[in-house]
Image: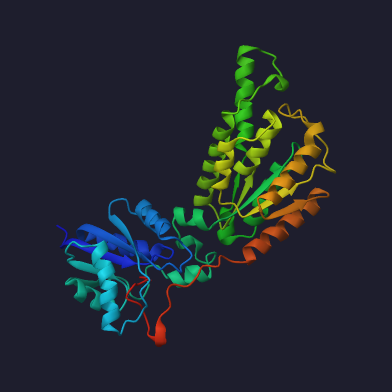
Amino acid sequence: MNPYRHGLVLGKFYPPHAGHHHLVRTAADRCERLTVLVCAASVESIPLADRVRWMREVHPDVRVVGAVDDIPVDLHDPGVWEAHMAVFRTAVPEPVDAVFTSEPYGRELGRRFGAESVCVDPDRTVFPVSGTAVRKDPVGCWDFLEPPVRAALARRVVVLGAESTGTTTMAWALAEHYRHRGGVWTQTRYVPEYGREFSEHKLAGLRARRPGADWDEVEFTSEEFPLIARRQTELEDEAARAGSPVLFCDTDAFATTIWHERYLGGPNDEVARIAARGQQHLWLLTDHRGVGFEDDGLRDGEHLRPWMTARFAAELARTSRRTVALTGPHEQRLATAVAAVDALLGEGWDLADPLPTPCGCGGTPVPENR
């Protein structure tokens, strides 16, 4: 039998990492039921809703609730403590038997809840990581992050362009380049173009009905493009969850908006809405000039390549997407792409610090818990 009826883990989880999850799992093993209270100040970079969602995914068997707490931080001021406790008790009104933390303030937090304080791995010997370390160096802490956090932090790079301009070759070459850097980078993923797979199935279906049918006989409907855009996005998200701090995508939902124009002559509002929800950070546009057209059985638009390159460039600029054009031979394009990706990664993640502690008072009653 678990020794506690209702346990509480309270923290910022900004962002959650392996140490947080060890704390929650330890508490869950010792309680009949456990509540995880995620607190966030409005100045923080990662939304409270995201942190709650991540914790719920990783810990589906415990209750996870969130609370916004912008009260100034001071462990030594009883009035400030009470103000924070009012937020905590509003979020968790039920009696609490045990408070689980990894910090010295756990004793006082437990006392104010009328609960036993249980300290778990205060020296970080099980998982040597902290929220501060993750915010400072996500790459160095990557192995301590769960899939939903990786997906949110991964820098997503899209290679897009007209038919037969080397997008697939470039996306794959970039993934290989970063894998060869070793360490966490060996997990770098490449996301293939789902539209091509979809096209192959359409052509195969047509040939099943009419053997010998050619690609120029395949017809697309407007309703098919949102399906393509959604599946492309799903594949991207799946890869980001399992990959390194950078992800390379052979096209994306935004590119699908231009492909809809190419085949059907105008925009598709649903595809545009899917593209607007994207989490990409950099677009690499492959120029058609200097690249010979190769008909692989699913291409028929050599004459449209200048128009498509121009449309991609215009829409990327109009929507203020960060774009780098790739021109010249493959080696030159790859060097340009690597420089652009390195610049993106070199900018870091710009994760704001938590609500600061005034007057040099250490700690916070809205704890990070590691």
Q: Residue 346 location in percent, x, y?
A: 64, 66
Q: Nearer the viewer, residue 365 or 239?
A: 365
Quadrant occupied by the C terminus: bottom left
Front-most of residues 259 and 287? 259
Answer yes or no: is residue 4 visible.
yes
Query: Which one is nearer the viewer's eye here, 133 or 122?
Result: 133
Q: Quadrant of the N terminus?
A: bottom left
**Relative vertical location of residue 76 with respect to residue 306 in this rendering, above or below:** below
Q: Is residue 167 left or right of residue 82?
A: right
Give the residue displayed 40% in from the left and 87% down from the top: 359
Q: Which residue lies furthest to the right in this view?
A: 290
Question: Left or right: 281 with respect to 3?
Answer: right
Choose top left, top right, bottom left or bottom right for residue 15. bottom left
Q: Residue 91 location, x and y as percent?
A: 27, 62
Q: Would you place residue 162 above or below residue 299 in this image?
A: below
**Is 156 rendered above or below residue 131?**
above
> Left of 86 or right of it: where is 273?
right
Identified at 50% across, 45% down, the residue is 238
